[in-house]
Amino acid sequence: MKRNVFVHTGRYVLLMVEAFKRPDKDRVFWSHLFREFKNLGVDSVGIVAIISVFMGAVVAMQTAYNIDSPLIPMTMVGFTTRQSVILEFSPTIVSLILAGKVGSRIASEIGTMRVSEQIDALKIMGVNPANFLILPKITASMIINPVLIVISIGIALTGGWLVSLLTGLVTPQTYIEGIVYWFDPYTVFYALIKTVVFAFIIASVSGYMGYYVEGGSLEVGEHSTKAVVYSSILIILFNLILTKLLLA
């Protein structure tokens, strides 16, 4: 088991070294990059929006229901929703969702190319397949995922506002006052830093799992599942590490 961990870690590092070499043709790289913006980012806006609006609504409702002391102002509903969404729910939960959606797509796409010998064909043509296939995905994820998280934060806070508007648990004005109360821009910076790290984990781990598929379509499915599981575990681990480093 320990040997397998060291083997995979070594192969992963070597693959990343190959992936981050300068592209042979800049025009091809930029073409693939913009395609990945759509595949990995734009196509994920819908699921991010749906999850975020309900996430913000639930946090606002739970906070309002649990304020049972007259000494606690109702502005805490907006404040708690804002802090929960920015610090944890949007960057971490949405990244875990993207690990499932985007990670499995990356692993299956590259894995299919491996079992159909397209990667071997790229090597024969003198193309660096790791750089050609994985670098655009990592770059696109690290650029577009923070945009998705900013969208998620905005939609989640809007979901909390809709709860205040439709349920009467707290007035919309009080909710907004709580959102703007004692706002620290560093929390957004913290969320974006986490998102960039999580995006690298998702794209690189999924690319690695797809790149080293051996077998056929069954193995592609297995590696796609492993890509999601390993990415999720690493996201949770680095969430703890980054929180300790950035908020301690």
Image (cartoon, helix red, strand yellow):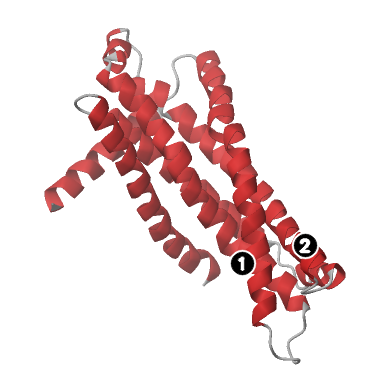
Residue at position x 30%, y 29% in the image: 211
Residue at position x 87%, y 69% in the image: 173
| Picture quadrant of residue 120 | top left
Label 1–label 2 contact, CB within 8 A: no
Q: Which residue is mark 1?
A: 84
Residue at position x 63%, y 48% in the image: 50
Q: Is residue 3 left or right of residue 147?
A: left
Height in image: 111 above or below 231? above
10 Å crowding of disc 1: few (<14), some (14-19), many (20+): some
| 132 and 218: which is toward the camera | 218
Counting every numbered tag in the picture gives 2
| Picture quadrant of residue 178 | bottom right
| 76 and 246: which is toward the camera | 76
Residue at position x 14%, y 53% in the image: 2
Q: Is residue 74 left or right of residue 17?
A: right
Q: What x and y, as percent, mark residue 98?
A: 49, 44
The outermost residue toward the front is 167
10 Å crowding of disc 2: few (<14), some (14-19), many (20+): many
Q: Which residue is mark 2?
A: 161
| Picture quadrant of residue 222 | top left
Asked whether residue 146 is in view, the answer is: no
Q: What x and y, as percent, mark residue 202?
A: 43, 43
- Indicate which disc, 1 or 2, sits on the residue closer to the N terminus: 1
> At label 2, which amino acid type do we have?
Trp
Q: What x and y, as percent, mark residue 246?
A: 53, 64
Task: Measure how far apart labels 1 and 2 are at the Cα level.
Answer: 15 Å
Height in image: 202 above or below 60? above
Secondary element type, mark 1: helix
Q: What x and y, as percent, mark residue 20?
A: 41, 31
